[in-house]
Image (cartoon, coloured by chain):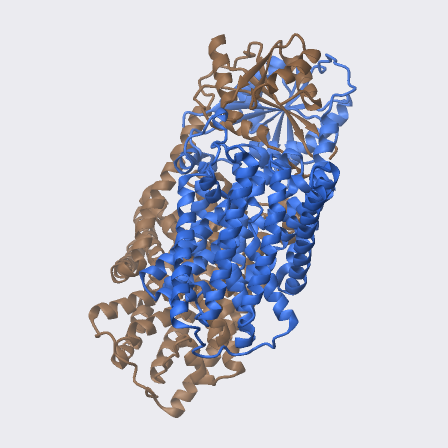
Chain colours: A blue, B brown
């Protein structure tokens, strides 16, 4: 039944040989790598606006300079990553660059930061997307959590089916978003020239003084606009040759688009003195101001939701890939490195989906509450990756290495400073959670690897000479609940492998054992049957005690083998009607009272019932 | 860890020999058997009031005659059960009486009706108790579901610990309730004499016409006052000798108390023209009218909650007992008949608790919404039990058998008519649910017994001569994931029991198998190792296919035995870091692709790791 549901949702399994990558031209590559970066303006603008509006119109007047400062940072980071693309034509994710050049610990920190940010990208993109949609359809505002969760489930199922982030389906929302926003900004700029600057209908109330802290806070939250800019540098090998050149050009186009959309929307918002309603995003308010309330406004909001959903989807490609890389090296549970039926890292996808869903539920679908946790991971990864590039150029000392070092060094400094600013200004609001999690996870990853290494060492045969040492004849203990056909099968098997057999009956009601013994002696008069009383009505406990006792008495360093007669009903629901003693007993024998070096063999002799 | 939590909540296990029953004197017996019956007035009064108030003051004027009609029914039913006590001194529950005298199907219907009503008693008593409490402490009104669930958890844990319904702890709330209510009614009667009748401050608005349907509906919901009256007849053997005489007298006292409390409270409510506030029960309003708002009112409400909680608790004694009786005869899963650590039917208690909790959650803690489902089971059981008594007297033909038959016949007719009235008048509101469930459950119970009988027949050795036919030498297939210490243990064991051994390696990545084979040949050059490619990366599927294929090729009617090398990490959480392939494989071998007569032996050779 489970199989059928899975087949319906996920589809039939794909053979391993179908794995492979198609090369992408620049148009498709831009669509594949830019959604996260381009869609960032949705929440970055919103956070700058919310951060400044509390200081009234004087605060909002700072949106433009802050937007320009962030754009400068964008240029620096884009140049830095342009160089990473040249330096790592095989793909230079933060984890690889930091590990290669700075060492294992920085690499692991970068990878952890990346994983956390993938998770937050998924959560923030979904909540921001739903807020964009609810700005056009106010009836949805009260149901943002459930709408976000529904989209999450759809994305999860699509990814488990093996959706390619490079497909045409993914490209449509990206170009729709770019087209719609560029058109809106152009039309808005035209209206701005004709109409002149706007002024606030009602001056925004001042609830906080305009402090330096408030300004840096707005800058720090606005830095979320840069998240996702690193994605092209991870994926250079996917481009058509010449890979580095094409990837570099695509990065430049993407950075230009990011800058235009970000600066354009912030500039027009300030020029028209736009304010948002309580249950509306500032981008929605801007769109309403420019195109009016109507189908055009709804289209803009839907395009925003779609690109944000695609951005969330990029996490579903990135997170499982990075966690599979780490799992392959033993830092994460091995299951994360296993390719599922549809050639995707299904365990990573499911894990990310559950974690994202929990984040959305805990933070009640509120983007503003999630943002303080966000961007720290991205900027930490930026910094480590750029610092790694400095070392890379310095080690390589190729042509113009010092200029390249300076550019990446500038990038590292700028993103490092931004990271510190983000942590300091948003520490109390939630940044502490991320700061706490990173070292916790890094420690966990090291201890997982330590466990795998210890297990490998314990299981290793190195130094052991090949030996053919069959075990001595085995002693068998066979727990019985009565004399029936399943037991006959089990006894036949036991007698075919051992001479020394003892049957045990755990007696719950006094006298029941003797009644069983009478039948027993008809069938197996020469096999001893022991009755173990169980005053506390437990079956497993007295049986384990009996086994321990028998082993002690024999004192041959061997543990008795347990043969379990087990009858299996025809349907799964019938299993509920039986006591499942065999199952409990097997679990207890395998997992409880275990001791290194013990080896209690368990033999299951199933008897399949007709019904 | 689980064991420790269990020990903390439930306590240490008790030996079977501690089971036993103390005899009760009449004072203790009344406390043990009456809570359900006495507390019924809490919701019965409330429902009569709610049912009539919609027809305004003309409607409420009918409360008194309806109360008298229900009291008449009470007298008839009490007399009927007085006779059951004489006829069944060994305890005459509906299930026993109906089955003995009417046959298996009526008996099973009575038992099902009883089980459903135990469940509803638990749910209704808890919600009504919390409503009584919230009438005194209005802040709780919005949190009725959670308060009811907390009390439910407390009752569940106490019952799992083995709380005796006959203990002193249970007697206190019963006598507190009786004392407090009798005092209130006496004081109220005194005030009534002095003050004369009251009149409505505001006339209740008329929203429904006063139809015959409305009146019968109020009568039907008021019949819930009778639920619980049968309990003494179930427990006759617990009384001190002479059992029947003492039980009969206790029943008379209980019926008198029920009548006085019910008629007294309804009479005073009408005399004073009491109306309840929106978030208050009518009994609370009556108490406020008599003793004023203050500590006395709070005490009355707390006493109401306490007896209702004790009434819910009687379900936790009754439900597991009846379900254990039915399970012992094979009508319910056997686990329900197993005595738990603390000598209680723990599975029945847990099942009842979960079902009650779900009812409370689904019906949002609203007694009024639950009532239409209630009392049908009780009245159906009353009718079947009384009808059974008629047959009983007729068969026995002892002294005065015809008078006894007439009394029980009258009881059967009256309760049967009431049952029909309840079903008809509350059908749409929810009675249909109960009406639907009873035949469904009866069918389910029969099919459970059919399953157990079929299994017993399949397992039976009757007609099979004792035979000693050891199996032919076994063939062994050993799935391997690599050559390591756990495998050495498993191979040693395999070689000690079989000559024909084949190792199978399921190859996920092309080439991996050959690398394993090189090591394999160093260790076991004379044991064949087969490489099975797995293009879909599944381990279990190809392995099962290989086993089927091997068996077909050998064509000796035997299935190969599977020896599983399994390493077990030291802690449970480390298990999460491994693929658990062995576990999946065992489940697949046992439960999937099974076929009657197949017998694939599974041998588990565990290797316990140090860490």
- Residue A171 x %, y %: 42, 44
Q: Could one spot residue A554 in this view of the protein?
A: yes
Left-right relation of B410 to A502: left
Q: Could one spot residue B239 in this view of the protein?
A: no
Residue in view at x 56 percent, y 29 percent: A481
- Residue A170 x %, y %: 43, 43
* Extreme residue toward the front, this view: A399
| Image quadrant where residue A539 sits | top right
Relative to B386, say whether A202 is above or below: below
- Residue A127 x %, y %: 48, 57
Residue in view at x 43 percent, y 52 percent: A178
- Residue A501 x %, y %: 65, 19
Relative to B151, say whether B257 is above or below: below
Foreground residue, A520 or B423? Answer: B423
Foreground residue, B176 or A28? Answer: A28
Left-right relation of A189 to A362: left
* Extreme residue toward the bottom, this view: B194
Relative to B590, say whether A498 is above or below: above
Residue in view at x 74 percent, y 21 percent: A461
Foreground residue, A512 or B128? Answer: B128
Foreground residue, A6 or A206? Answer: A206
Residue in view at x 41 percent, y 68 percent: A192
Image quadrant in which the C terminus of chain B is located: top right
């Amino acid at each position: 039944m489970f199989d059928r549901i899975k087949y319906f949702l996920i589809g039939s399994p794909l053979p391993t040989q179908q794995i492979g990558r198609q090369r992408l031209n620049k148009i498709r590559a831009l669509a594949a790598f830019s959604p996260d970066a381009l869609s960032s303006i949705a929440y970055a603008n919103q956070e700058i606006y919310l951060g400044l509006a509390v200081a009234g119109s004087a605060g909002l007047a700072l949106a433009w300079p802050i937007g320009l400062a962030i754009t400068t940072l964008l240029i620096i980071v884009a140049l830095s990553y342009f160089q990473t693309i040249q330096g790592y034509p095989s793909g230079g994710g933060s984890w690889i660059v930091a590990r290669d050049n700075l060492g294992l610990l920085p690499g692991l920190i970068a990878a952890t930061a990346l994983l956390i940010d993938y998770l937050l990208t998924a959560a923030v993109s979904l909540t921001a997307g739903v807020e964009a949609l609810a700005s056009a359809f106010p009836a949805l505002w009260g149901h943002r959590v459930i709408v976000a969760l529904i989209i999450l489930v759809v994305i999860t199922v699509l990814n488990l089916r093996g959706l390619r982030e490079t497909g045409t389906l993914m490209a449509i929302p990206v170009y729709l978003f770019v087209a719609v926003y560029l058109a809106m900004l152009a039309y808005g700029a035209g209206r701005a020239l004709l109409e002149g600057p706007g002024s606030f209908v009602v001056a925004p109330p001042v609830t906080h003084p305009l402090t330096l802290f408030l300004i840096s806070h707005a800058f720090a939250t606005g830095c979320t606009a840069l998240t996702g800019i690193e994605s092209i540098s991870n994926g250079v090998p996917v481009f058509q040759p010449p890979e580095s050149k094409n990837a570099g050009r695509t990065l430049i186009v993407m950075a230009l688009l990011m800058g235009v959309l970000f600066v354009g929307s912030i500039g027009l918002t300030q020029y028209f003195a736009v304010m948002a309603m309580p249950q509306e995003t500032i981008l929605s308010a801007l769109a309403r101001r420019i195109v009016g309330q109507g189908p055009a406004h709804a289209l803009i909001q839907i395009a925003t939701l779609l690109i944000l959903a695609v951005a969330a989807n990029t996490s579903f490609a990135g997170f499982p890939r990075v966690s599979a890389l780490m799992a392959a090296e033993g830092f994460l549970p091995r299951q994360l490195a296993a390719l599922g039926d549809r050639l995707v890292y299904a365990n990573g996808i499911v894990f990310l989906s559950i974690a994202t869903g929990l984040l959305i539920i805990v933070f009640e679908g509120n983007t503003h509450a999630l943002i303080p946790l966000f961007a720290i991971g991205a900027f930490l990864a930026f910094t480590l990756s750029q610092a790694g590039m400095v070392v890379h150029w310095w080690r390589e000392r190729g042509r113009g290495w010092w200029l390249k070092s300076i550019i990446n060094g500038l990038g590292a400094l700028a993103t490092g400073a931004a990271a510190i600013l983000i942590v300091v200004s948003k520490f109390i609001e939630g940044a502490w959670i991320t700061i706490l999690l990173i070292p916790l996870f890094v420690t966990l990853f090291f201890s997982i690897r330590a466990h795998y290494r210890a297990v490998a060492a314990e299981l290793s045969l190195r130094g052991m000479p090949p030996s053919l040492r069959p075990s001595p004849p085995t002693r068998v203990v066979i727990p019985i609940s009565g004399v029936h056909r399943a037991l006959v099968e089990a006894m036949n098997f036991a007698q075919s492998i051992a001479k020394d057999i003892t049957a045990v009956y755990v007696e719950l009601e006094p006298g029941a054992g003797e009644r069983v013994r009478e039948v027993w002696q008809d069938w197996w008069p020469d096999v001893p049957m022991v009755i173990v009383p169980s005053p506390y009505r437990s079956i497993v406990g007295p049986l384990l005690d009996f086994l321990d006792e028998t082993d002690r008495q024999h004192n041959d360093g061997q543990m008795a083998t347990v043969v379990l007669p087990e009858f299996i009903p025809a349907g799964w629901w019938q299993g509920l009607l039986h006591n499942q003693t065999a199952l409990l007993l097997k679990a207890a024998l395998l997992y409880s009272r275990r001791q290194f070096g013990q080896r209690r063999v368990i033999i299951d002799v199933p008897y399949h019932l007709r019904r």
